[in-house]
Amino acid sequence: MNNYLKTIGLEVHLELKSKNKIFSSSINGFGSSANTLINEIDLGYPGVLPIMNEEVINLGIKAAIILNCKINKKMHFDRKNYFYPDLPKGYQITQSRTPIGYDGYVEIERDGEVKRIEISDIHLEEDTAKSTHRQNESLLDFNRAGVPLLEIVTKACIDDPIDAKLYLEKLKELMLYADISDCKMEEGSMRCDANISVRKKEQDKLNEKIEIKNIGSISNVVLALEQCAKEQIEMYENNESIRAQTRRFDDKLNKTVLMRYKETVNDYRYFPEPDIPYVYLDDERIESIKKDIPLLPDELRRIYHEKGLNDISSNKLINNLSLSKFFNSFLDEEIDLVTASNLLLGDIASYLNKLEITIADTKLTKDKFISLVNKVSDNSLTSRNVKDILEDVLEKDLSLEEIIKEKGIANITDSNELSDLVDQVISANEASVTDYLNGHDRALKYLMGQIMKASQGKANPAMVNKILIEKLQLKKKNN
Amino acid sequence: MDKLTEEEVMHVAKLARIEISKEELEKYQVSLKKIFAEIEKIKEIEIEGDILISPTSSVCPLESITDSISNPKEILANANDTSGNYIKVPVVIDHE
């Protein structure tokens, strides 16, 4: 096993989040009833003329910039000819000679080391209809026909399935943050094909590769590649040869299954699509798109770190696009961002997860959140208080002050009052005080509990803790 | 060589999904060869610049297109066979 090298390349198809399809005015949507989002162009009727959707071009440029690609400023589309019922025209409109972007890369980080995964090209094309195969018939839904796709092709430069996974995760993160695609593998808006060949370490020439089609999840990409490599090595060890072929990964059986041997490339007979004129991308357009690219995960990680968030909180925020977007709107505010992230990732996230909603579905306004963060960071609200008022904060149109008033939350933050409370509890619990002075730290917790109880939960715990320790230290000194 | 091989003609037929008889095969070996020879001649012409007809680009500027929602009934009426809202075609995969 160990004297073989793996060579891996990945092809990812992303459905772009444009309002309309790539060449027609039909809505680009997922989940509608079959054949309701279609017109003559999507169906490939004779004599219709595709029209280039500008929004799709702009999304393609945005992706090219983010993936560090060079941009083809004068590009055209090509026809890729093949027969299949999901493609009634008999050809797919795609880009072969002038992909919108080429020679790019994505950086991944593994064990503290940054690696570049090189991208050979990214190109725009139309999706085909969706087929559902039954025993004796196939059913076609053309809602997907003409949905804009961006195909992102890496060079065969990956030598480890784990790097393939890190690349896919990074790509997904980037495309989500830039609002290019919603990247849902389960809905098919992100699809991944992988190809892999193996060869002996001492051999320079690459062996025939095997393509694994439509892998269902990023974690399955690793499993499928590992398994496919193992199968190939076994064949070479048995002196069998390998023909270029397409397989699929069966995750239940953990093995790859042959689909077909490859037809030769020329059979697609690519030629320039004469129905779509050249597309010219001027610098002005490219620059204005560049300006509108939001903060991307790597930059966000750096900013979060600078603002004092730890790595765990940073990553948790970045993994939750809507929370992160909300959080980012406070980056320039004078608030305690660590408290803000703790609130978002703690009580607020659990509330949202429980109801399966996002922060945009709540009544939490920017101002309300700022007041909440300030009150928590200056200790006027305890974590208990936050739990008590959170539902109202998220569900009611009232301001934070109104909610606090309505809930009757009045915390004792007056230090004289707190000091009296602490004194009372100390004198009533001499045994625990002695325990503490003899080094039993747990007695402190008990005393804290007693003080909170005496205040009916209204004392500010941080302040109580400070006063209590001060008083106990004083006693220790005097003993 | 003044005709294509049988394999070449059969390959073209396969790509075009047409069935041809033995007589047709012999006929196409000659006639397709003539067409291919013309294409070879055209390929000799040296062209510079645009491979597409560029004047069309001025009448079709990039534009954002607007919504349309279709009526599946009208569309399905043109299909040979349907099932619910779906267009039905002969099965296209081999079941394992």
Image (spheres, coloured by chain):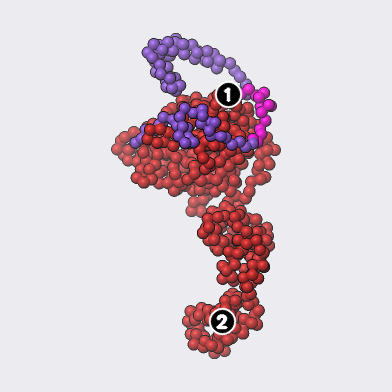
The answer to which quarter of the image holds residue B74 is top right
Disc 1 secondary structure class: loop
In the picture shown, does residue A476 fall above or below A65? below
Task: Give the magenta part as a residue range.
Answer: B52-65
Residue found at x 31% / y 39%: A237
Locate residue A233 relative to residue B59 in the image: left or right.
left
Q: Can you see residue A61?
A: no
Disc 2 secondary structure class: helix
The chain letter under disc 1 is A
Residue B25 spot, x, y in % from top left: 40, 13
Dot 1 crowding, Cα within 10 Å, few <14, some 14–19, many 20+: few
Under mark 2, the amino acid is Ala
Q: Can you see residue A398?
A: yes
The letter of the purple chain is B
Task: Look at mark 2 in the image and give the residue it sits on.
Answer: A454
**Distance from Cα at disc 2 to Cα at disc 1:** 84 Å
Res A199 label:
none
Q: Colour of chain A?
A: red
A273, A355: nearer the viewer: A355
Res A47 label:
1
As drawn, which residue projects farthest toward the bottom? A479
Quarter of the image with the N terminus of chain A in it: top left
A454, A98: nearer the viewer: A454
Residue found at x 60% / y 40%: A18
Answer yes or no: do the residues labelled 2 and 1 have beta carbons within 8 Å?
no
Under mark 1, the amino acid is Gly
